[in-house]
Amino acid sequence: MQAVNVLTDRVKRITKINTEIADWLQEDNSKLNNSIQERRRVEDQYVQSLKKLLTFKVPNSQSELGVFSGPWDKILQSVDATAHSHHVFASQLEKDVEGPLRNFQSRKEMQNMQTISANLTAMARDLEDAQKKADALTRKGPKTNTQKMADATARLESATQQWDSQAPFIFETLQAIDEQRVNQLRDLLTQYETHESDQAQRNQARAADTLASMLEISTEQEIGSFKERVLSGKPRLEKRATASRQSSNVPTSQTLAPPPPPPSSIGHRDDDASDHSGLAEGKGGTMAY
C-alpha cells in the first residue's frame, strides 16, 4: 500500500499545485495579515481607481496652468494609458495563465489517471488481503487445511502477478502526466512573467515620454506670458528709474560756468611801468635836495 499511497498523494498534489497557483494568480495571498486579495481584482480595482482619478475636478481648464498645460495633459494621458495597460494585463492573466492551469485537471489524461489510480488502489488492497490470509494459514502450520492453503497461495500469486504487471504501467503514466504538468506550469509562469515584463516596459516608455515633457517646461516663458497677459491693452509707462537717470545727466549752471581767465601779460607790463616811474620820481626828488 505504500506505493499506492505515494501515487495517490502525487496525483492529488498535481491537482492541488495547479489549483493553488491558479488561485494565487487570481488571488494575491498575503499570509502575514491572513487576508486574501484577488490578483485580478487588484488589477481591476487599480484600473477603476485610475479612471476615477481622471475625473478629478482640478486642475482643469480654468486653472490657468500656463506652460504646465501641455505637460499636465501628458500626465493625464499617461494615467489613462496605465489604466488600459493594467486592464490588458488582467485579461491576459485570466486567458493565458489562470485558465489553462485550472483546465489541466479536466484533461483526458488526468481523468484517466483518476480511474487508473482507483484501480491501483483496488489491486493493492487485494494483494495486501491475500498476503495476510496466506500468512495466517502459514502460521497454523500442520493444522492448516491443504485446500485453503492452496487457494490462498494461488490468490496471492495472482494478486502479485497483477500488481507486477500493471503497477509499473500506472506509475509510468503518472510520470508522463506529471512531466506534462511541470512543463505546462513552467511555460505558463514564463508567460505570466512575460506579460508582466511587457507591462513594465510599456510603463517605463510612457514615464520617459512624460518626463521629457516636464523637462521642457520653461520658467522664462511662463513669466513672459504672465507679463504679457497683465500688460495687454494697457499704455506702456516710462520707467521712473530711466527718467531719474536722464535727469541726472542734465548739466547745471555751475557746471557750465567757465573758469576765470589767467592774469594778462599787459597788466604785468603796466604794473612794471608804474613801479619804474615811482622809482624815477623818488630818485629825482633826492637829487633835487
Image (spheres, rainbow, N blue to C red):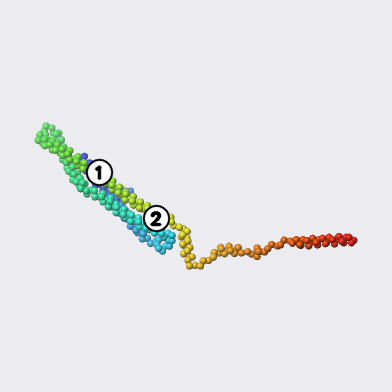
Q: Quadrant of the N terminus?
A: top left
Q: Is residue 129 visible?
A: no
Horizontal and vertical percent position of residue 168: 19, 39
In primary-sequence order, the first of circles 2 and 1 is: 1
Residue assigned mark 2? 210
Q: Is residue 95 visible?
A: yes
Q: CB under 8 Å between callouts 2 and 1?
A: no
Q: Is residue 248 left or right of residue 74?
A: right
- Name which residue lies at 49% across and 67% down: 234
Going by the numbered disc 1, the residue's amino acid type is Glu
Going by the numbered disc 2, the residue's amino acid type is Thr
**Disc 2 versus disc 1: nearer the observer:** 2
Judged from the image, the secondary structure of the residue bearing numbered disc 2 is helix
Horizontal and vertical percent position of residue 122: 17, 42
Nearest the eye: 116 or 218: 218
Judged from the image, the secondary structure of the residue bearing numbered disc 1 is helix
Q: Residues within 10 Å of mark 2 (few under 14, many from 20)?
A: some
- Name which residue lies at 26% across and 51% down: 99
Horizontal and vertical percent position of residue 55: 36, 60
- Name which residue lies at 65% across and 63% down: 255
Instruction: Examine the image and state in which quarter residue 211 appears.
Output: bottom left
Nearest the eye: 19 or 151: 19
Q: Quadrant of the C terminus?
A: bottom right
Q: Is residue 189 left or right of residue 237?
A: left
Q: How many marks?
A: 2
Q: CA distance from mark 2 to mark 1?
A: 46 Å
Residue assigned mark 1? 179
